Amino acid sequence: MAGSGRIACVLLAVTLAAPGAAGAAAEPPGLSVRADGVLVKEGRPYRGIGVNYFDLFYRTLLKPGDTSYEEGLKALAARKIPFARFMCSGFWPSENRLYQQDKEAYFQRLDAVVRAAEKHGIGLIPSLFWNLSTVPDLVGEPCDQWGNPESKTHAWMRAYTREVVTRYRESPAIWGWEFGNEYNLSADLPNAAEWRPAVHPELGTPASRSRRDELTHDMIRTAFAAFAKTVRQHDPHRIVLTGNAFPRPSAWHQRQEKSWTTDTPEQYREMLLGDNPDPHNTLSVHAYQEDVKRIAATQQIAVAAKKPLFVGEFGVPGARTPAAERQFRELLATIEREGVPLAALWVYDFSGQDADWNVTATNGRAYQLEAVAEANARLRGER
């Protein structure tokens, strides 16, 4: 999938030249949002439940001979699980060294992942800046520069976004573009000094952190908006996502007064919408434990705002027990019942979380994958 001759372009050309295609306008690839706020794929309303495949690319970035993602994608395709969200970069600064030193080799590995997804018919939602401190660390700035559009941090973000989006925007495998992972949970913490980003100089971080590595909601909103604007310059159609979790129950009060005071429903709504700023055309949350109780109201907010809701992570940890299975099925049933258009199980085929979270087609949590497959069948009207 190198350069302008990528397989996706060839497939698209063949499709447009196929009998009966003449005179018919091709629908844009991936997921998009209609003017009335409905999520659509190929011009039709869409609902689907996928998985988080965290190290889909990361495994081959670290070990170029590791192509085990092929079997993982094949297993998803066999169960008609439609898409995967994944980290689309290195987690630590040092893990982006290949991109900095040999972009062609870096993108050859990412090309292979996208090509495999095309082969197996799996959609992809790449999350470009998963770890909040990685880009600032790469350019030698504190994390507060996410709030400065003139910073080196923003320049690096824009450049990487442009390269990834323009390289893969013709691929039918790409369903949307996501900024990062749960930046909103680190914003305006009353005890922020205790939760500054980790320090691992051997992995490319600075030797120490300071107050300037503490984020605010205003900073992350600036970064989100700049990312979405960059995406829109190169892809006018696909959904753009922040990757946020549910706002903390005290998010409004944290922003206003650095306190843990619980927000009112209206304050919650204000923070949810504010943390997914235009031109983001979706709302992003992650649902665990008691979050199940927030899904219905959040879906109502999403419908009113005409921004489809993405429950970008949901799941239940631990061994399969009657209680765990009951909790999982209740969470999944809530997503279905409330009309959430898009959701993704945490986490598929990720050996780093074998103890509590990893779900595969053969391990003790395989029931979760099968339940997701059954839910998708119902959403497709097959059951």
Image: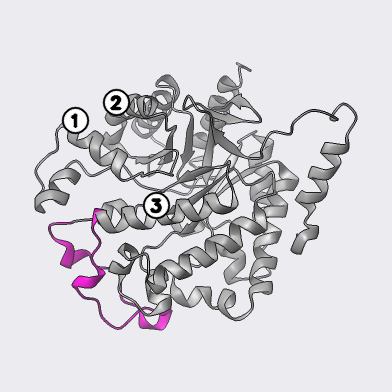
Residue 368 on image: x %, y %: 49, 35
Query: Which kind of residue does numbered mark 1 sit on?
Result: Pro
Tag 1 residue: 265
Q: Are marks 1 and 2 in contact (CB under 8 Å)?
A: yes
The magenta segment: 189-217
In x, y percent, where is residue 129?
Answer: 45, 61
Q: Main secondary structure of the magenta part?
A: loop
Camera-nearest residue between 143 and 115? 143
Mark toward the viewer: 3 or 1? 3
Q: Quadrant of residue 281?
A: top left
Estimate the spatial distance between the alpha carbons at disc 3 and disc 1, rounded to whole Å. Answer: 24 Å
Residue 115, image x, y percentages: 72, 53
User: Residue 71: which disc?
Assistant: none
Q: Is residue 254 left or right of residue 293?
A: left
The amino acid on which the numbered mark 3 sits, given as a three-letter code, is Ala
| The N terminus lies in quadrant | bottom right
Q: Which mark is residue 297?
A: 2
Q: Residues within 10 Å of mark 3 (few under 14, many from 20)?
A: many
Between 273 and 190, the one nearer to me in the picture: 273
Q: Pointer 2: residues within 10 angstroms few (<14), some, or many (20+)?
A: few
Q: Amino acid at mark 2?
A: Ala
Picture quadrant of residue 332: top left
Q: Residues within 10 Å of mark 1 (few under 14, many from 20)?
A: few
Q: Is residue 253 above or below residue 201?
A: above
Q: How is the image coloured?
A: one colour
- Label 1 or label 2, whichever comes before in sequence order: 1
Q: Is residue 256 left or right of residue 65?
A: left
Task: Write the residue at 39% across / 25% down.
Answer: 303
Helix, strand or loop at disc 1?
A: helix
CB atoms at circles 3 and 1 under 8 Å apart?
no
